[in-house]
Image (tube, helix red, strand yellow):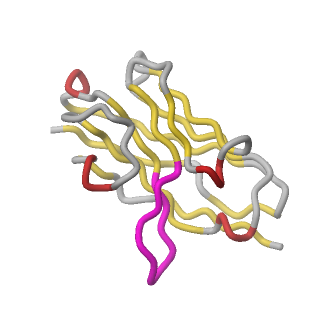
């Protein structure tokens, strides 16, 4: 089993930046990729970005390209999401998830087995 815990959320003004962290524990040797998703109440969970656990390959949702950067530090067992030029529509609960099976940097939540509890990001206008 793998446990993941997100941190770093908060309130920020539009145009500002936040860095989210996701700490993994447990059987981390089984992790192939990590993803970030976000969800607004009443809406489906939305893909944000994914990264190979070994580093290197990444995948981003089109609306996040150029603004968000995902990175993995598998020595610290942590994945980061640097978010710049934040907009009010980025307001959501952000979730980190671990993929221990596929490694496709998938955009659908079903490819990720282990999920954190989420961290709230609120961007004020």
On screen, 33 above or below 90?
Answer: above
The residues colored magenta run 37-48
Q: Nearer the viewer, residue 10 or 45?
A: 45
Above or below for 125 versus 113: below
**Residue 29: percent from the left, percent from the top?**
23, 21
Residue located at (27% from left, 47% from top): 112
Q: Position of residue 52 (x, y in %)?
A: 40, 26
Classify the position of the C terminus by image quarter: bottom right
Left or right of 23, for residue 27: left
Q: Is residue 84 magenta?
A: no
| Residue drawn at 85 percent across, 56 percent down | 15
Quarter of the rendering occupied by the N terminus: top left
Residue drawn at x 63%, y 36% as measured from the top left = 69
107 sits left or right of 109 in the view = right
8 up-or-down from 122: above or below: above
* Residue for point 46% across, 19% down: 55
| Quarter of image, res 78 | top left
């Amino acid at each position: 089993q793998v446990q993941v815990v997100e941190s770093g959320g908060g309130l920020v003004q539009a145009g500002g930046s936040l860095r989210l962290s996701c700490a993994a524990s447990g059987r981390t040797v089984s992790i192939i990729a990590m993803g970030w998703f976000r969800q607004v109440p009443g809406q489906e969970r939305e893909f944000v970005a994914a990264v190979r656990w070994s580093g290197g390959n990444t995948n981003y949702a089109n609306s996040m390209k150029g603004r968000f950067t995902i990175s993995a530090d598998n020595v610290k067992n942590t994945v980061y999401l640097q978010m710049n030029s934040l907009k009010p529509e980025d307001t959501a609960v952000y979730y980190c998830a671990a993929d221990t099976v596929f490694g496709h940097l998938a955009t659908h939540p079903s490819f990720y087995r282990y999920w954190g509890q989420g961290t709230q990001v609120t961007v004020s206008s």
